Amino acid sequence: MRTPSVVAILGSTLTGEFEDVKLMNELLTKKNKKTGWNTPTHVDAASRGFIAPFLYPDLEWYFRLPLVKSINVSGHKYGLVYPCVGWVVWRRKDDLPEELVFHINYLGSDQPTFTLNFSKGSSQIIAQFYQFIRLGTEVTIVLCLF
């Protein structure tokens, strides 16, 4: 049985406010030591994950903190891309539970996947990547704020 994660929100959808991920990490580290638990943190950075590193470069919220094991970001919230594009990133391969990975025999070889449907096109990711390159960091951040 796996221990659930504590979830910190980096950018509330309603207000845009950040929870103090660094403080949560410190408090959870103390709790883990006191109880013998090994509870990690997941950062829900769906609303501000792409802009926080540029606007607040000294803010400690991601893999700089030892208990952060996974982060999700919603690319579609930044505009000029297809709906529903998003990512989850894990610190290490071992942090993604194997029981959440589907193994598919595709063209004769094993293809592990962690998606709702493995046969999606790449147009969503290509469109967002194009926006980052075409518009540049400064323009992309302005778009993200609106």
Image: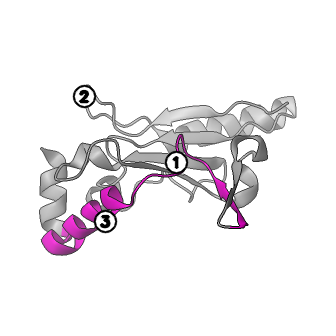
Distance between the Cα atoms at labels 1 and 3? 21 Å
Q: Which residues are the magenta region? A: 108-137
In this view, the residue farthest toward the front is 107
Q: Name the foreground residue: 113 vs 144.
A: 113
Picture residue at 59% right of the left edge, 48% below the top: 70
Q: Which corner quadrant of the image does residue 74 belong to?
A: top left
Q: Secondary structure at mark 3?
A: helix
Q: Earlier in the sequence, mark 2 or mark 3?
A: 2
Mark 1 or mark 2, which is nearer to you?
1
In the depicted structure, whether residue 83 falls above or below residue 59: above
Badge number at residue 71: 1
Q: Position of residue 12 (x, y in %)?
A: 33, 31
Asked if residue 79 lies left or right of residue 17, the reply is left
Q: Position of residue 36 (x, y in %)?
A: 87, 34
Q: Earlier in the sequence, mark 1 or mark 3?
A: 1
Q: Which corner quadrant of the image does residue 19 belong to?
A: top left
Q: Which corner quadrant of the image does residue 122 belong to?
A: bottom left
- Which image quadrant: the C terminus? top left
Q: Residues within 10 Å of mark 3 (few under 14, many from 20)?
A: few
Residue type pointed to by label 3: Ile
Distance between the Cα atoms at labels 1 and 2? 20 Å
Residue type pointed to by label 2: Thr
Residue that mark 2 sits on = 15
Picture residue at 31% right of the left edge, 60% below the top: 123
Asked if residue 143 lies left or right of residue 49, the reply is left
Mark 1 or mark 3, which is nearer to you?
3
Magenta run includes residue 122: yes
In the depicted structure, whether residue 41 falls above or below residue 143: above
Q: Residues within 10 Å of mark 2 (few under 14, many from 20)?
A: few
Display coloring: one colour
Residue that mark 3 sits on = 126
